[in-house]
Amino acid sequence: MTTQITLFIIARNEADKIAKCLASAKELVDEIVLVDDSTDDTAAIAQQFGARVFTHPFEGFTAQKNFALDQVKTTWALSLDADEVLTPQLAQEIRQAVQNTDYDGFELTRVNCFLGKRMRHGGLKKEHILRLVRAQKARYEGGLVHERLCVEGRTGRLKNVFMHYSYNDIETYFEKFNKYTTLAAQTMYEKGKKRSFIAVLFILPLEFLRRYVFKLGFLDGIRGFIWASFSTFYIFVKYMKLWLLHTRDNQ
């Protein structure tokens, strides 16, 4: 009997991307679970692919993804974001990998694209991420943001890649930027973390140098410079939002 796989996704207003994601996995998976918090046609598009759609208010990435994982009924669960696409080679490798294996999870290799082009440096070259797991042995850990999928047991790594079309334009980047910096600041605030303004001033140039020079971001041309600059600005905004949360406590 063929081992069954469910693709599970959380999404918010991804109508322009979700179809490409689901189309890349439709021949691989036996079921699709979408946990939706959208005001656009994301859910309707997913239903055209036969997805089971659950409307659920967003309470942080960890909680939202655990809710989605709880809806999986098959042995194996595959996690993708709406802006990620399986290659045919990886889909075939996944189908073969889950048959009669002693592993309880597999890391997949993600290739990142930024502003319409594949990035090869600046910390974006290739990422190995646990995304394919035995559903009953897996759980997400983390806070409101930067969640991490964990599994009890042995893990392996597949060789083929999937694509991450993260930000096709700058407008989309800053829409997510605002949300992520707020969640990151809130997570640090709830843990009682603080960062002095002087410390932030030292961190910012180091972050830019790390991505643009040490991780060879300059080899990605203007996109490498933009990515290093935006990543540095992300750090600045995150800590300023944290500072504001603590400042309001003292008013």
Image (cartoon, grey):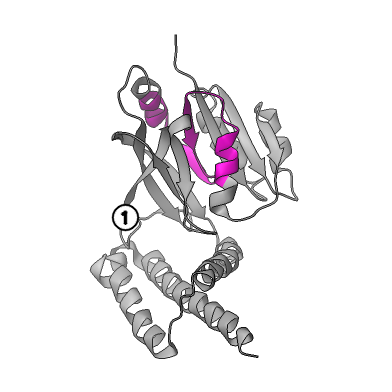
Location of residue 116 with respect to 230 vertically, above or below? above
Give the quarter of the figure containing the C terminus: bottom right
Q: Residue at x 65, y 30 (%)?
A: 51
Location of residue 110 with respect to 106 vertically, above or below? below
Q: Is residue 63 left or right of residue 56?
A: left
Amino acid at pointer 1: Arg
Q: Is residue 40 left or right of residue 222?
A: right
Q: Residue at x 59, y 87 (%)?
A: 247
Give the quarter of the figure containing the N terminus: top left
Say which quarter of the image contains residue 163: top left
Tell me if residue 20 can be seen. Answer: no
Q: Residue at x 63, y 37 (%)?
A: 34
Residue 23 position, x and y percent, is 56, 31
Location of residue 101 with respect to 238 vertically, above or below? above
Reading the image, the residue beneath label 1 is 120
Q: Residue at x 61, y 64 (%)?
A: 175
Residue 153 position, x and y percent, is 33, 34
Which residue is more in the foreground, 133 or 122? 133
Residue 10 position, x and y percent, is 60, 44
Tell me if residue 27 can be seen. Answer: yes
Q: Is residue 225 left or right of residue 29?
A: left
Residue 6 position, x and y percent, is 53, 28
Query: Residues in magenta?
Result: 65-94
- Quick check: is 167 in the magenta stretch? no
- Quick check: is 91 in the magenta stretch? yes
